[in-house]
Image: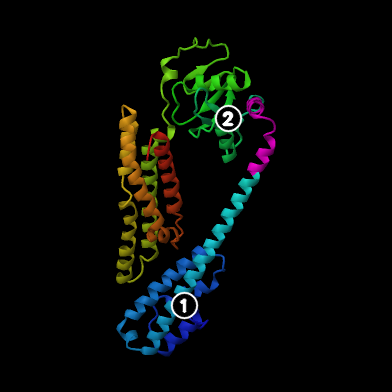
Amino acid sequence: MDSKLLTESGWKATALKFKIKDNGLQQTLAAYEKLDDHEHAARLKALASVNLQAGNLKKVKEVAALPQVNKYLTDLLSAAESDRKQIEAAAAAKASAEAKKREAEEKQGDEEEEEEDNGDYPVRLIAAFQKLKSGKDLAFEFIVCDAKPHCALMVAKRINPKHKEQLSKITGGSKRFLHVGRCHFEDGRFHFTMEQPVSGLARKLQDSIKNFTSKKLPIKVGAESADADDEQPASGQSSAAAAAKPEPPALANASDVWHKTWDAIEATIEQLKTAAKAEFANEEPAVVTEVEQMTSRFDGVLAKLDHSLADSLAKAHAAKDSAARNAELKIAKGILTDFILHVKSDPLIAHIDANPFGVKTNLKQNLSDCLKHMAEAIGRGGSTA
């Protein structure tokens, strides 16, 4: 393909030769030539303008009557499409490399943390609490494996899959994990913070720690406390709070998480539509109309991802018994499956994320993260078979 097609000089010579009134294509090509190869977003934005301007010129009656000019513009559009694919591939490769770099750094962090986890489970657990107690403004992540007769707890700088394996082994194979937040030491107690405090969890954590380490530590979860000098319930007895079946935090706030994510994405799409329209606001009316038609399609992403999933999860959370909850969760699981397939297959989402107008949308990542949270809520809230 002719290397001069996407250059100012190539089009300028053709326009002068055939006395074509330029519509800004020459200036756009000049700007495109000056961009560095790594300026992926700016180059894609310039190519979008090239496509619009060259396409509009081809529609002009005088241009359409000139075979040589018409062919030149056709070849120019082909060259622009070829460049676009190459730029998008380069941008994807860069993003992949950055993701691998982050993954390697995280893996290195996990390995460093694993090296610190010397000794058996009781020793590691007490060591973590000692660090929290002696460290100023220090907070660790924690995870609970909710098993019977005793749950098991892991506290570490960062919870990783290895910790889950260890807890599952300690509890005889249980995989009922509750991701519930962070732990820090304050006012003489170990505070376990989470979005939705679970009733009775303070006592359960204290019992678990004592069972595995023989240490009775002062624990606080939400408004509930289990101090070191509290009397334990007599054998065979338990309080109503301790007997209550804890509800997974992921289910409790799933509906709110969906609505907040949906609202944020809606605002981002509106921002993109505004930026795209502003970019071509001074173009000919036909171009402005074309841009408006293009941006109106963006609303189709959320049209297929409605609030039915959030409504179903809210009903499951409000269910009065486990049977009703499980029945509603089966409905939610069906909706979730449809949503996941849509996010994976809809080309419009990728098109929006690759927009050349300087608006970072991250639709696919944000939707995937949100749907992962919904899947956790369904998986932990009851049977989804």
Residue of label 2: 170
Q: Which of marks 2 and 1 is nearer the N terminus?
A: 1
Asked whether 93 falls inside the magenta stretch, the response is no
Residue of label 1: 79
In this orientation, which residue lies closer to the viewer: 267 or 249? 249
Q: Give the range drawn in magenta.
A: 109-130
299, above or below 374, in the image: below
Q: Is residue 319 visible?
A: yes
Q: Residue at x 32, y 71 (%)?
A: 284
Which element is circle 2 on? helix
In this orientation, which residue lies closer to the viewer: 385 or 318? 385
Q: In which quarter of the image is the C terminus?
A: top left
Q: Position of residue 178 (x, y in %)?
A: 48, 32
* Label 2 neighbour load within 10 Å: few <14, some 14-19, many 20+: some
Q: Residue at x 32, y 60 (%)?
A: 297
Q: Which amino acid does label 1 sit on?
A: Ala
Q: Position of residue 363 (x, y in %)?
A: 42, 53
Q: Where is residue 328 in the image (x, y as percent from the top left)?
A: 31, 37
Does the magenta stretch mainly form a helix, a strand or a loop?
Answer: helix
In this orientation, which residue lies closer to the viewer: 64 or 9? 64
Asked whether 126 falls inside the magenta stretch, the response is yes
217, above or below 324, in the image: above
Q: Residue at x 49, y 65 (%)?
A: 88
Q: Position of residue 342 (x, y in %)?
A: 36, 54
Q: Which amino acid does label 2 sit on?
A: Ile
